Image (spheres, rainbow, N blue to C red):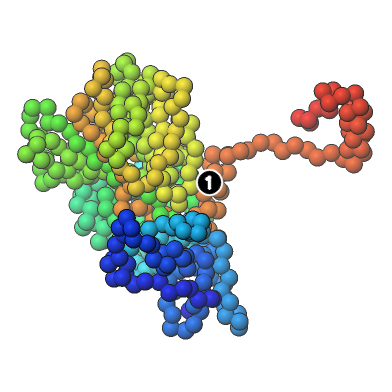
Amino acid sequence: PPRFSGRSPPRPSTTEMEQETVSGSAELRAEAASYRCSACHGDEDWGLGHPIRGRAKSRSLSAAPALASTREFRRTRSLHGPCPVTTFGPKACVLQNPQTIMHIQDPASQRLTWNKSPKSVLVIKKIRDASLLQPFKELCVYLMEENNMIVYVEKKVLEDPAIVSDDRFGPVKRKFCTFREGELSHYDDISNQIDLIICLGGDGTLLYASSLFQGSVPPVMAFHLGSLGFLTPFNFENFQSQVTQVIQGNAAVVLRSRLKVRVVKELQGKKVAVPNGISENGVLAAALDAEVGKQVMQYQVLNEVVIDRGPSSYLSNVDVYLDGHLITTVQGDACPAGVIVSTPTGSTAYAAAAGASMIHPNVPAIMITPICPHSLSFRPIVVPAGVELKIMLSPEARNTVWVSFDGRKRQEVRHGDSVSITTSRYPLPSICVRDPVSDWFESLAQCLHWNVRKKQAHFAEDEEDAHEEDGAGNQACGPAVCTRDRRT
């Protein structure tokens, strides 16, 4: 296996670092002052028997370059960027805390692998779309007959009249394992049954697949058979080879972060019964805290949490807290006025329509975007992914607000209720066609037509000489005189 050339300076063990205390008169150790991240500087030993503590960094997601006879290992930049130098001047450095050190893999090196060969596949098809029936049948037949896999589908898909009346599809249809959306509320059980998710449709189909798994999500392979398809990079024309490659493993994958949303509601003087710990939406587990008289619900959100004023004609007036500190009050005056809290994946959805910047899904961040703010200075902001946001109605608010999660499960938020948002531990692993960077820019170009403009034509040689002579004459008349039209 590849090793990094060079040799790193000795570093104290974890036990020694934990026993080290810093007082007002104590001096920092020389090891801390000379600390270097060997994983990023590439100065680890190449010798045999030395484990790799760094990460192979490659801008493309292909395998590492083959080692030459000189045993050199070529390294390129990481998507996370280089580790910063933690010594500042001759005497200052960052105090090392081994309890908070995080070893994060370079997103460019993230590839899908299987501990065991996948056997069960969940196929999610966009409903009420007759054009997807034939691709759905072809995919299911290929998975079951060619790969001997167990296919899960929703019961409402098999209730489609076109599938019911197809006698040739009958033998395959009888082999399906079916479920209804409400049955997936016990997501721990279904997570242990599904190895792979294949989506046939658009972005909404992928969002629906995310909502079915409120814990760990199996890898998702999304085929572009919908209208927009920003999150669905695969074309269905050659699905056999692409599915086979994913089943065999070693496919590039991007971990799309999700938001963990916790909604705490006052019971308004009456006790709400929640059977079997399942909320009324049929998807998400809910808890009833009888001691404080509040109902607590949790959601996993892939795109965004939207809080708006609903049908009221008053200003929306909500307070936004960050890690317990009030950072701003959102006041908006329009029908959808409110605030959007989105993931990097959601930054190209509703947030982009509200004027926010687009963030690559590998950037660990949370976007806060106002909707129709009654302020000239309220601009979208990006906060670290590890913070906790809490949104509540302001005491001065004249009306309630409404909250939705990826456009679903819309519900009212009253005085005393709160919506807490932070980054979830359970991302959605989305399989890439090429790599996370190439796929993202391809989607920007093909779906959103990002920065598309008719290109300026170049001058012919005779025209260029004529314009140069014309420009020299204009310069003699003064810098403010120019007859050249720069738009042509």
* Residue 100 percent across, percent down from the top left: 33, 58
From the top left corner, tell me how far across and down residue 198 is, in percent: 39, 55
- Tell me the quarter of the image containing the C terminus: top right
Please tell me whether residue 79 is drawn above or below residue 202 in the rendered image: below
Observer-nearest of 370 and 35: 35
User: Residue 103 at what x, y percent from top left?
Assistant: 39, 62
Residue 275, visible in the rendered structure: yes
Callout 1 secondary element: helix
Q: Quadrant of residue 422?
A: top left
- Which residue is under mark 1? 443
Which residue is depicted at the point 42% across and 67% down? 30
Q: Residues within 10 Å of mark 1 (few under 14, many from 20)?
A: some
Question: Going 38% across and 18% down the picture, which residue do you hit?
Answer: 333
Extreme-front residue of the structure: 25
Question: Camera-side residue: 238 or 324?
Answer: 324
Residue sitting at x 30%, y 26%: 318
Left or right: 436 in relation to 325:
right
The residue under the point 46% across, 65% down is 34
- Which one is nearer the viewer's eye here, 368 or 322? 322
Q: Is residue 131 left or right of residue 162?
A: right
Is any part of residue 242 visible from this angle? no
> In the picture shown, does residue 237 fall above or below 420?
below
Mark 1 belongs to which amino acid? Ser
Question: On the picture, is 157 further left or further right than 45?
Answer: left
Give whichever of 424, 154 is nearer the camera.
424
Query: Compared to 47, does 450 lie above or below?
Result: above
- Residue 94 occupies which quadrant of the picture? bottom left
For the image shown, how many numbered marks are present on the structure?
1
At which x and y percent is residue 75? 56, 67
